[in-house]
Amino acid sequence: MTIEATQRRDGAILVLLPKGRIEAPDTEEFERSVRERILNGDLNIIIDFAQVEAIDSAGIRSLLSIAARVVVKHGKLVLCGLGNNLGTLFRVTAIDQVVQIVESYEEAVESFR
C-alpha cells in the first residue's frame, strides 16, 4: 500500500499531508516524490502529521534524508501535527534536534515569516 500524501501550497510553502502509516517499503516512493519537488525548487516545506498513525525506522530515515536535501539547498523543513505518540518518538530519536517541530499548522506557517 502506498503512502497517501496530499500536496498543496500555502503561498511559497509546499504543504504535504501524509495519511495512514509511513512504513517500508512505501517510504521510497514518498521520499522520491518529495525529492522531485525539492529539485524543482520547492525548498520551504511543511509536513503535517495530523493524519499519520505510525512511522517506522524507514520512515524516519526518509524524513532525515528529506531534511538533509532541504538544508543543502538552503531551504527549511518544518514538521507539525505530531500528537503525543509521534512527538515522543521524534524526541527519543532526536529528530527534533535536526528538524524544526511545532505543535500546529499555523505555527509551522508562521515559522517561515
Image (spheres, rainbow, N blue to C red):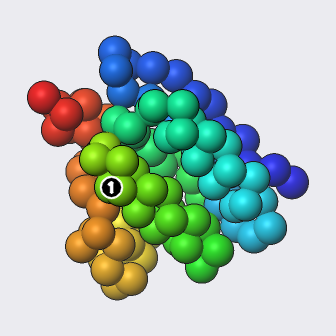
The structure residue drawn at horizontal position 19% and vertical position 34%, both measured from the top left corner, is 112
Q: Does residue 27 appear left or right of residue 106 in this picture? A: right
The structure residue drawn at horizontal position 26% and vertical position 39%, both measured from the top left corner, is 108
The image shows residue 100, relative to residue 84, as above or below, that is: above
Q: Residue furthest right?
A: 1
The image shows residue 55, relative to residue 48, as above or below, that is: below
> Looking at the image, can residue 57 be seen?
yes
Q: Where is residue 41 in the image (x, y as percent from the top left)?
A: 46, 31
Q: Quadrant of the N terminus?
A: bottom right
Q: Does residue 20 appear left or right of residue 84 in this picture? A: right
Q: Mark 1 points at which residue?
A: 71
- Location of residue 67 (image quadrant): bottom left
The structure residue drawn at horizontal position 47% and vertical position 49%, both measured from the top left corner, is 49
Q: Residue furthest top?
A: 11
> Looking at the image, can residue 80 be seen?
no
Amino acid carrying mark 1 in the image: Val
Nearer-the-camera pick, 43 or 110? 43
- Secondary structure found at label 1: helix
